[in-house]
Image (cartoon, rainbow, N blue to C red):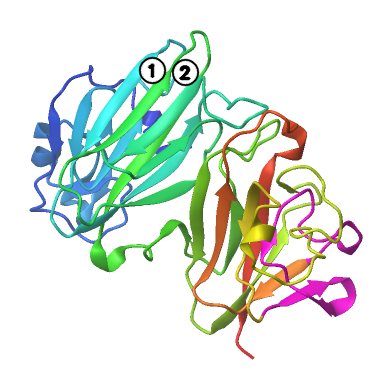
Amino acid sequence: MSLLNSISHLKPKSHRSIYVVNLYLLLIICLGVCLNPYECKIQHGEALGPCALGFGVCCVFTATCDEEIENNVTYFVNPDFPGLTQQSGECIIKIKKIASDISQIRLDFTHFNLGQPNRKTGVCEVDVFTLSDGNSQNVVLCGQNSGEHLYFDVDNMKDPLTITMNLTQENLFRIWEIKISQIEFNRRAPAGCRQYHQSRQGEIRTMNYAINGRHLANQDYNVCIRQEEGMCSVAYEPCDDNSFKIGPPIAADDPGSGDGPLTNSLAEFRECNDRIIMPCDSEDFIMPGGIMGMCNLLHCGNTFCSSGDRPCKIESSIKPFSIRVQFGPGTKDESPEDNLGMCLKFEQLPCT
């Protein structure tokens, strides 16, 4: 059950600044902020259970449209949460750093269900989520992204971050609940990592990876995996036979098919407008039966490997562990069925 499902109502929209005095913060397990009960009350938080051996309360802060937030953890929700929002309009919040040593903002999408992108182009048009620092750094999303997360670097940022939900269509059902956490430098994800998986095994999905979904256009980011103790490599494989569809099918000997020659020339990068780039210096391409093949730097089309070699794995010992998602501008001549996106399972392997 979602953390905020027990909250019966939200505060009215306002332009107030939510600020938490960090005099009573303790290292405890709490999905909000552990505060003195009085501090939680005067800061308009919701007390959801005890913390700090009963001396404090787990204080949860929620924000909706037209609010400015400035605390360790805040849940940004749609105006009708936990119900659905149907009306059109623009919903904006501002995020201020609580201290100069805050290095990143992490967003966890507990719920994120907006209108789908254009089925042919992958461009967000009906509903658009934008995270912006006011300069050149922007994240644009739409569709279904519940369970995903992202990091946003704010080392040198002085002005507030802005999250804008631009909802252009009436009578479309939407819900969002986004946990916004401020991350100190010593807990930050590695530089350049939009997503950071901190486990031995898990799944990597492109944004809006969903039934009847379509991967988004104009995406370029790194997905990183923290190297666990005693682990020296990581193996990737599709979640199922239909979980790698990035562009139309391509010939087996084309770059990106999984069978093409090992290369990194810019000319061949242009063969795929949308692609997944994987480190490819020394890892082996593992086919059924344990047969070693040639690794390919970029992957696109409808198969992670060639069609005759499924299931397959790619094992990489290149560090740091990461892959790059690089989707270009939307084009109208591609079918949505060929552009579902990607779901990969990963597992770190012990040193030998």
**Quarter of the figure that contains the C terminus:** bottom right
Asked if residue 147 can be seen in this view, the reply is no
Is 60 above or below relative to 201? above
Is 342 above or below relative to 75? below
Asked if residue 226 can be seen in this view, the reply is yes
Locate residue 285: give its quadrant: bottom right
Q: Residues within 10 Å of mark 2 (few under 14, many from 20)?
A: some
Which residues are drawn in magenta?
A: 283-312
Residue at 74% of width from left, 58% of height from top?
Answer: 256
Which amino acid does the dot numbered 1 rest on? Asp
**How many numbered marks does the figure carry?**
2
Q: Which residue is mark 2?
A: 84
Locate residue 82: give its quadrant: top left
In contact (CB < 8 Å): disc 2 and disc 1: yes
Looking at the picture, how far across and down is residue 151, in whole percent?
A: 38, 52
User: Would residue 48 be found to the left or right of residue 252 on screen?
Assistant: left
Q: Which residue is mark 1?
A: 80
Looking at the picture, how far across and down is residue 63, in whole percent?
A: 27, 29
Residue at 18% of width from left, 20% of height from top?
Answer: 14
Residue at 32% of width from left, 63% of height from top?
Answer: 188
Residue at 26% of width from left, 29% of height from top?
Answer: 93
Q: Is residue 291 located in the magenta-colored stretch of the structure?
A: yes
Which amino acid does the dot numbered 2 rest on? Leu
Q: Alpha carbon of mark 2 to alpha carbon of mark 1: how far?
A: 6 Å
Q: Residues within 10 Å of mark 1 (few under 14, many from 20)?
A: some
User: Would residue 34 be found to the left or right of residue 152 on screen?
Assistant: left
Q: Which one is nearer the viewer's eye here, 300 or 273?
A: 273
| Tag 1 secondary structure | loop
Looking at the picture, how far across and down is residue 235, in whole percent?
A: 67, 71
Looking at the picture, how far across and down is residue 139, in whole percent?
A: 41, 41
Specify the label residue 111 is tagged with. Answer: none
Q: Residue furthest front?
A: 267
